[in-house]
Amino acid sequence: MNIYLLCTGNTCRSPMAEAILRSKDIENMSVRSAGIHAQDGLHIADNARTLIEEANMPYTKKSRTLSREDVEWADYIFTMTESHKRVLLQIFPGEKEKIYTLKGFISPSTNGDVHDPYGGNLETYRETFNELSQLMNQLEKKLQEDDES
């Protein structure tokens, strides 16, 4: 199963989500992240890197921009916000069956956005990291349930 996680710049939310999900070492799962408005090769945010390293998780150190190749590779594409999802649906209308907001996929009746810590202090990033940790736990459970049914 190929999971593609998207945010705006691929320096905060999606790299943290990627590291958290990848650290679960789920059998037959590959994880990538990118940003809808990212530049290839920028360092991820210092606070994101600090938290990922504190948790001793493998991570991707540089940002990646959204690519058609990755969209086609993905079985599921999870966006951090509803607006990211709308942009993706405009660019890739033929891929709509695999594009979801992260929160909307986990709990369709409870949508919403993942808080963007960009520009915040370490504690702000920690709050988003903790939110993403909970969401990745819920995502793992949901994917296992869907796989069993």
Image: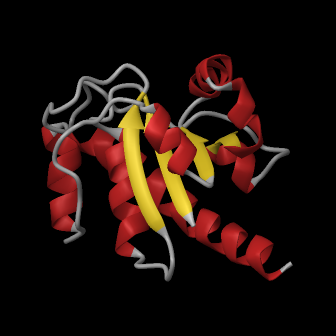
Q: Quadrant of residue 37?
A: top left
Residue drawn 48% across and 45% down?
5
Q: Quadrant of residue 148?
A: bottom right
Residue drawn 60% across and 25% down?
88
Where residue 110 appears, as percent x and y from the top left, is 78, 43
Residue drawn 38% across and 63% down?
20
* Quarter of the image with the C terminus in it: bottom right
Where residue 74 appears, as percent x and y from the top left, is 55, 51
* Quarter of the image with the N terminus in it: bottom right
> Is residue 51 visible to us here?
yes
Q: Nearer the viewer, residue 119 or 80?
A: 80
The colour scheme used to paint the residues is: secondary structure
Q: Quadrant of residue 77?
A: top right
* Depicted 29 relative to depicted 113: above or below: below
Q: Nearer the viewer, residue 148 or 108?
A: 148
Q: Is residue 83 left or right of residue 66?
A: right
Where residue 52 appears, as percent x and y from the top left, is 23, 59
> Is residue 115 visible to us here?
no
Q: Is residue 45 left or right of residue 143?
A: left
* Depicted 126 relative to depicted 83: above or below: below
Residue drawn 16% across and 62% down?
53
Number of marks in the image?
0
Q: Nearer the viewer, residue 32 or 46?
A: 32
